[in-house]
């Protein structure tokens, strides 16, 4: 006898699970359907099948510009967040110092700050300093937001790997940097990549903070938000939505699967060595 | 070079260890400096603004509690805050109740594909936030999918759409629930997955029914993760402004929207806006500190 769940209970829960999955995916499927619908308004009855909206967004330079701006911001801010996150994660896992709990609380606190509060805080800072709003100001904000996520990915991995490997390299005369480059970095590389991807997708999708500090070159979420107010742009926005959603799903799933495979492989190497 | 160093007396070795310890500030310096300048100082500026210690407006300034006093006596701002609290509480409670059986099914039904199913459940959370809101805008609008389907099938005439669907408190809560549901299942799943099955077997051997075992063993042991899941949703939705601005209309207007509007282009009042922002931050900080032992993000991420 299964102590956690009766047979009928399991059947009931499976049905409930399926129902929730339908609820979660239905809106995405509906977007997918209407992205091919030959009608300027996304409503029933469905018109014919068309690639028109995809074609239209491919020729929309404003939209492509926004996607490009977001890609640049996401790439730069996630590189920055991973670098800072690595420094912080190494300190937290490999060093002993006073006030570690407080430091780690501070490093993770951007996770819980309401983005509206952080957004206006940055706005006031840049006003005070007289810094004009630009791509750079968005990057600065996104590094702060992504930093805790990179730390949360890197710390468990650093905790996992055998410190004696680093100590051995160090005892054999390798410098701190050399030890990091030849031993630590290769071992945590999968986690570094997945930290980068998490930071990248966080930044690429970020609207709330960006809306306060964005300059004249708008990001993709900012463009989307303003496009949502003009119904005539809705169908091509839906087409973009489908492309971006599918791409981000592929990236995220691939990153997670890749990380697990890579870590398992490294893990077996460690075991053999 | 390295050999020569290693061959020396223990003194240089100790010196090298010493140099190593000195690198901790170097390592931590950059991340902490970044957060100090772009996170702590900006919040301090807002706090200073709320007390009128600092202002970008010309004119005399000095410490005053005037804006805070106005806030404390304002039925509008406090009323809006309570409305947001109620909306967030309702959404968080409902989706935690929905997520618990999902997590229970994945962790304890013995299904072989539990990680595939878990990924299936979480994947929508990893796609664009704005686009998921967009989907509901398309679905709920007066000319949207639901209404046009009703007209098309003749269940409702086009003159009488279900107009409460979009731009309402209901729409905001539905969309927020939709967005956060996959995420809350995660911490509950992790805790149920780590539950020692032998405890359930022991309960069963001692004559407990499944329901008793659930109430006396499983539920108490997974309760901390339920609290954590609840807060993971409650904290971000409390200060939410993007979803209500897109699907909320007038009745779905939340506290976060008020903050944005006070810093907006219409009738900006940065001093009052700062008070509202710092108050929200204080509430969130208090929640985080009080429930700190439930909120261990490392445990969730460690999976």
Image (cartoon, grey):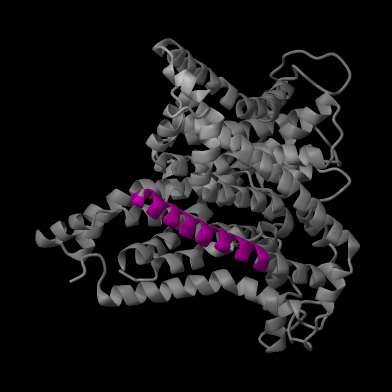
Is residue A35 part of the magenta span, yes or no? no
Q: Quadrant of the N terminus of chain A?
A: bottom left
Residue appearing at x 78%, y 30% in the figure? A124
Q: Which residues are magenta?
A: A246-272
**Is residue B180 at all visible to an observer of this figure?**
yes
Image coordinates of residue A8 in percent, x first then y, are 29, 77
Query: Which secondary structure is most common in the magenta stretch?
Result: helix
Residue appearing at x 29%, y 54% in the figure? B219
Q: Quadrant of residue B97?
A: bottom left
Please state which of residues B30 and B98 is positioned toward the viewer in this rendering: B30
Residue reaching furthest left?
B206
Q: How many numbered dots are placed on residues in this image? A: 0
Image coordinates of residue A255 in percent, x first then y, are 56, 58
Please state which of residues A211 and A179 is positioned toward the viewer in this rendering: A179
Height in image: A100 above or below A264? above
Q: Quadrant of residue A129?
A: top right
Image coordinates of residue A117 in percent, x first then y, are 68, 36
Height in image: B145 above or below A88? below
Is residue A271 part of the magenta span, yes or no? yes
Residue appearing at x 76%, y 75% in the figure? B143
Please state which of residues A257 and B248 is positioned toward the viewer in this rendering: A257
Side (left or right) of B210 relative to B90? left
Side (left or right) of B245 relative to B289? right
């Amino acid at each position: 006898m299964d102590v956690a769940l009766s047979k009928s209970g399991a059947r009931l829960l499976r049905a409930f699970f399926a129902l929730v999955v339908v609820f979660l995916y239905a809106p995405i499927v509906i977007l997918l359907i209407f992205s091919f619908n030959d009608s300027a308004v996304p409503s029933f009855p469905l018109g014919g099948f068309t690639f028109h909206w995809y074609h239209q967004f491919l020729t929309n330079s404003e939209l492509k510009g926004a996607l490009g701006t977001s890609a640049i911001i996401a790439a730069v801010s996630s590189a920055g967040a991973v670098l800072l996150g690595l420094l912080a994660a190494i300190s937290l896992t490999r060093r002993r110092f006073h006030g570690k709990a407080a430091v780690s609380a501070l490093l993770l606190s951007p996770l819980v700050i309401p983005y509206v509060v952080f957004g206006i805080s940055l706005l006031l800072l840049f006003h005070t300093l007289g810094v004009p709003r630009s791509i750079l100001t968005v990057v600065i904000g996104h590094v702060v937001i992504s930093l805790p996520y990179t730390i949360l990915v890197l710390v468990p991995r650093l905790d996992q790997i055998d410190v004696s490997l680093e100590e051995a390299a160090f005892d054999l005369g390798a410098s701190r940097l050399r030890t990091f480059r030849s031993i630590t970095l290769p071992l945590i590389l999968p986690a570094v990549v997945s930290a980068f991807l998490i930071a990248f997708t966080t930044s690429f999708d970020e609207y709330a903070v960006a809306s306060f500090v964005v300059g004249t070159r708008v990001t993709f979420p900012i463009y989307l938000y303003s496009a949502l107010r003009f119904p005539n742009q809705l169908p091509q926005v839906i087409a973009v939505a489908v492309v971006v959603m599918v791409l981000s799903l592929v990236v995220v799933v691939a990153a997670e699967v890749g990380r697990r495979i890579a870590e398992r492989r490294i893990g077996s190497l460690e075991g053999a060595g | 070079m390295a050999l020569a160093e290693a061959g020396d007396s223990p003194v240089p070795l100790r010196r090298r260890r010493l140099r190593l310890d000195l690198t901790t500030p170097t390592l931590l310096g950059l991340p902490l400096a970044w957060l100090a300048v772009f996170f702590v100082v900006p919040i301090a500026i807002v706090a200073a603004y709320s007390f009128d210690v600092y202002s970008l407006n010309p004119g005399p300034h000095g410490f005053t509690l005037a804006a805070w006093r106005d806030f404390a006596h304002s039925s509008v701002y406090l009323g809006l805050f309570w409305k947001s609290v109620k909306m967030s509480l309702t959404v968080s409670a409902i989706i935690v109740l929905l997520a618990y059986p999902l997590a229970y099914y994945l962790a304890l039904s013995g299904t072989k594909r539990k990680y595939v199913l878990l990924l299936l459940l979480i994947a929508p959370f990893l796609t664009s936030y704005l686009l998921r809101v967009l989907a509901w805008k398309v679905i709920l609008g007066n000319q949207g999918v639901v209404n046009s389907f009703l007209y098309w099938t003749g269940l409702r005439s086009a003159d009488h759409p279900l107009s409460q669907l979009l731009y309402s408190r209901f729409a905001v809560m539905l969309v927020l629930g939709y967005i956060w549901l996959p995420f809350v299942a995660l911490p509950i799943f992790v805790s149920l997955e780590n539950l020692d099955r032998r405890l359930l077997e022991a309960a069963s051997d001692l004559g407990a029914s499944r329901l008793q075992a659930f109430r006396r063993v499983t539920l108490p042991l997974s309760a901390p993760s339920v609290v954590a899941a609840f807060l993971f949703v409650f904290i971000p939705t409390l200060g939410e402004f993007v979803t209500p601005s897109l699907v909320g209309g007038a009745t779905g207007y939340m506290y976060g929207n008020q903050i944005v509007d006070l810093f907006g282009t219409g009738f900006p009042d940065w001093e009052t806006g700062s008070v509202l922002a710092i108050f929200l931050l204080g509430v969130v900080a208090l929640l985080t500190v009080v429930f700190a032992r439930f909120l261990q993000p490392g445990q969730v991420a460690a999976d």
